[in-house]
Amino acid sequence: MAAGEPGALGGYYFRFLPQRPFQSLSSQESTSRLRQWSMLGRIKAQAFGFDQTFQAYRKDDFVMAFFKDPNVIPNLKLLSDSSGQWITLGFASGRLRKI
């Protein structure tokens, strides 16, 4: 099975949902609290869907499949420690490790 096909990485196939709204982060109360704690602009929410039922006993497989998925790598945004800029997972992929 080729990378990016359903089932290629632990049996999960992920898709980026860029238009998914997160009203809890954009409400006036939320933005006020984020500003109070200097988090406004330093936090992002992104949505990804997947094609199977989540099974808690396979959580490690799920997480590893997520971070290795070809639909996640170019879309998942991370805040760079060094520059403070938003970068994609593709630029930081060498830093992923299992704890």
Image (cartoon, rainbow, N blue to C red):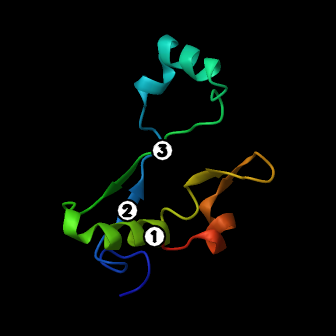
| Residue 88 locus on image (x, y percent) | 64, 57
In the picture, measured across the screen, residue 63 lies left or right of residue 93, that is left
Dot 2 or dot 1: first in sequence order is 2
SS under mark 1 = loop
SS under mark 3 = loop
| Residue 57 locus on image (x, y percent) | 20, 69
Foreground of the two, 93 or 38: 38
Measured Cα–Cα span from mark 3 to mark 2: 13 Å
Residue drawn at point x = 55 percent, y = 65 percent: 73
Q: Is residue 64 above or below residue 30?
A: below
Q: Are marks 3 and 2 in contact (CB under 8 Å)?
A: no
Measured Cα–Cα span from mark 2 to mark 1: 7 Å
| Residue 98 locus on image (x, y percent) | 48, 73
In the picture, measured across the screen, residue 58 lies left or right of residue 64, that is left
Which residue is identified by label 2? 14
SS under mark 2 = strand
Residue 69 — which label? 1
In the picture, measured across the screen, residue 27 lies left or right of residue 52, that is right
Q: Are marks 2 and 1 in contact (CB under 8 Å)?
A: yes
Q: Quadrant of residue 4?
A: bottom left
Residue drawn at point x = 49 percent, y = 40 percent: 45
Crowding at mark 1 (Cα within 10 Å: few <14, some 14-19, many 20+): many
Identify the amino acid type marked 1: Asp
Measured Cα–Cα span from mark 1 to mark 3: 15 Å
Which residue is identified by label 3? 46
Q: Is residue 44 above or below residue 79?
A: above
Identify the amino acid type marked 2: Phe
Dot 1 or dot 3: first in sequence order is 3
